[in-house]
Amino acid sequence: MTAELISVGTEILMGNIVNTNAQYLAQQCAMLGLSVYHQTVVGDNEERLSEAVRTALDRSDIVILSGGLGPTEDDLTKEVCAKVMDMPLEEDAHSRRMIEEYFKSIGTKKVTDNNWKQAMVPHGALVLDNHNGTAPGLIMEKNGKTAVLLPGPPVELYPMFKEQVFPYLQKLQPEKFVSRMVKICGVGESKVESQLLDLIDAQTNPTIATYAKVGEVHLRVTARVKNDEEAAALIKPVVKEIRKRFGNAVYTTKEEETLEMAVVRLLAKYELTVTTAESCTGGLLAGRIVNVPGASEVFREGFITYSNKAKRKRLDVNKATLKKYGAVSKETAREMAMGGVFATDADACVAVTGIAGPDGGTEEKPVGLVYISCYMNDNVVVEKYQFSGSRDKIREQAAVKGLDLLRRCILDNYGKS
Amino acid sequence: MTAELISVGTEILMGNIVNTNAQYLAQQCAMLGLSVYHQTVVGDNEERLSEAVRTALDRSDIVILSGGLGPTEDDLTKEVCAKVMDMPLEEDAHSRRMIEEYFKSIGTKKVTDNNWKQAMVPHGALVLDNHNGTAPGLIMEKNGKTAVLLPGPPVELYPMFKEQVFPYLQKLQPEKFVSRMVKICGVGESKVESQLLDLIDAQTNPTIATYAKVGEVHLRVTARVKNDEEAAALIKPVVKEIRKRFGNAVYTTKEEETLEMAVVRLLAKYELTVTTAESCTGGLLAGRIVNVPGASEVFREGFITYSNKAKRKRLDVNKATLKKYGAVSKETAREMAMGGVFATDADACVAVTGIAGPDGGTEEKPVGLVYISCYMNDNVVVEKYQFSGSRDKIREQAAVKGLDLLRRCILDNYGKS
């Protein structure tokens, strides 16, 4: 089956916002096994929107529209779809009640007239409750074609799609698609692909798709199946084979788990605490750890030692080391990591020192040169990296590698994930 | 004049990447005064791409395509446009030389055959040199319609558009559009709009567009003019009026300057250094300062004091203060900021302590409660905020307000920006 996306909104046409809804919906369609060949953006203009909807219904089985469901005169998506699909609008008692309840819940006493526009529903359409706003979503079916109308704000669109539209579309399909994520850190995309070439070449069901992230590669293994048992039977051996090939480079197979979440999970599991000693990343690494809810269990404090003086004072880095090898060196990274543990009661310390640019690089120590160190159990590891890209990209890559080095050290010292 | 965008790429259709090129190009078109009524995404499929190009050329004056210019068989954009516009491909000696030089510069000895495909140019087309990759861009004109073909990678597309396409399109227009950015921090979007209502309502030329960012509002003042003198005459009084109404809340009128750049610029101007004492932001605030090139002049070190023990040890926060008022309190924020200055030789310290959630909130101290403090010149300021949103959104807003408080303290102590 084919699906296509129509995003309605002047703010996208003007470039005021980036069209993240289209990405989300495209990903969801891919997970549902729907082929998306077209995405369109149009404004709240009756003529252009009508034409876009007609064209889309003509060439695709399912048309997913987002935006233009609000209470103002400008919002036309529902009206246009009702006209194009010849399903006249009528007041829906349930939608009216939902709107009343919503305004009551946010303490509004007098609901303005234009809000009742949102209780009008195309004849025969299925209403999708909106638990995060007033505009209900709609599913309209006619002549073997399906139109799905969703509100524009992501905070309303995402849960509505996940809870109500995804299961609906899944039922339209004779087969369902089940997928499993495998997240890898520390191996480049081309290397991941070449190590999986035989699997990728041979793939029919399940398929393996690779997605490159900063410092990471995510693999989605997707099976086309009739039920969950079949899914498990098809997916499990592939995931096992990937794990076998990449070992500890696989940091999670959980869809929602980020690298920092995996690190915090491992630290908590082994009852370890960590501190950070950052130069060029300047708090970025600690910031990612702290962004994990419950980080306080494993992270008490961190140091941002940007100057040499701070490295000496806070982390007891030797003056002679700084003089002889420089702030960006294996030796300084090592002493920073050791110093972080000695200055605190943490079990481990990750240290980062490098040249983020755009200035400050030399022939010997070019921009992008970063040393990352981890001290744990009286043992210190230092890794050298040469990153490329802008200052923020270099810093981001360094933070990712810092998290990953910490993760690998925990596994080396305390066992498997 | 009307323009429309066609993004070519399966990775957008699959949702692997978000279509940031379309946002960039839409913004540029808005700056050029071009009306964009349609954006389309299609894959590398000859039939669908041909139809998209035909439809677009039919209804718009200018069609801007991105992606599908690479060396592989899949890349079809140039071939399709050449066919649809009937401008047959022929080898371009200049493009061939550029490709040779590019490969030489990156140290490749043997250029694979498929790369020469990129030297083929539609008859009569203007070639746009690509200084960041091998695929040249193209401008094709026929029957009063213009097609602009750009490579997909943003690192190639952005500079090519800025340096070569923008001036070209500007010349196509009888009038030009000149705009100036005014960036505001510390005033909400609706308040900014209501305080500018008379200007926005009365606007014809220049126009004022507002863009909400996290903790910031950006205003773009755009004039439709014949020359730069006219632009200055139209824009200057409006910018002056905005400055008058928002005072120090305006942190810059420079297009490229971010809030942290403005802060670092002010610190450098008054030869001040700053340190940071972060609890819930966990390095985010320092990280933004460090992301500014040259930050080492004004920032030497920072503290991430997530636990109470770290707050006491590093920043000398009083045990009694923590016990009586708690870690998230005006009193603790104040002592953290003071402690940061006393523990270092910095001239100022920004401190942040709050509840980022999702857990840890109480009736009295709900999730999103954040105290931000700045100590400078024996004077300490504390501000209380109640943010909403996810953990990372709360932390991001806190970091923005921390930067802004520092900025305002510098202005209060040392004069105007």
Image: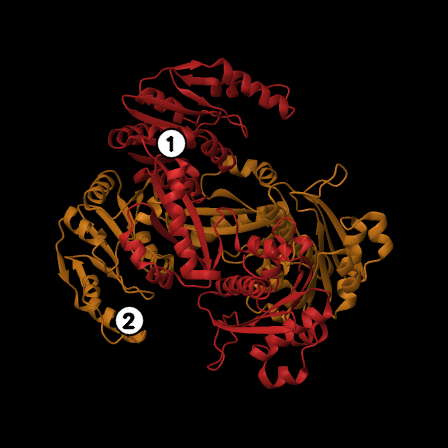
Chain colours: A red, B orange
Q: Quadrant of residue B89?
A: bottom left
**Where in the figure is residue B268, as x and y percent of width and height?**
63, 68
Residue B300 percent across, percent down from the top left = 66, 70
Closer to us: A204 or B317: A204
Residue that carries the numbered disc 1 in the rendered image: A170
Q: Quadrant of residue B166?
A: bottom left
* Residue at the image position 29 percent from the left and 53 percent from the top: B67
Residue at label 2?
Answer: B102
Q: Secondary structure at mark 2?
A: helix
In this rendering, would A71 be left or right of A352?
left
| Quadrant position of the C terminus of chain B in the picture | bottom right
The front one of A110 and A135 is: A135
The kind of secondary structure element at disc 1 is helix
Nearer to us in this view, B370 or B227? B370
In the image, taking residue A342 as reference, residue B217 lies left or right, namely left
Measured as percent of width and height from the top left, residue A248 is found at 49, 61
Q: Amino acid at mark 2?
A: Tyr
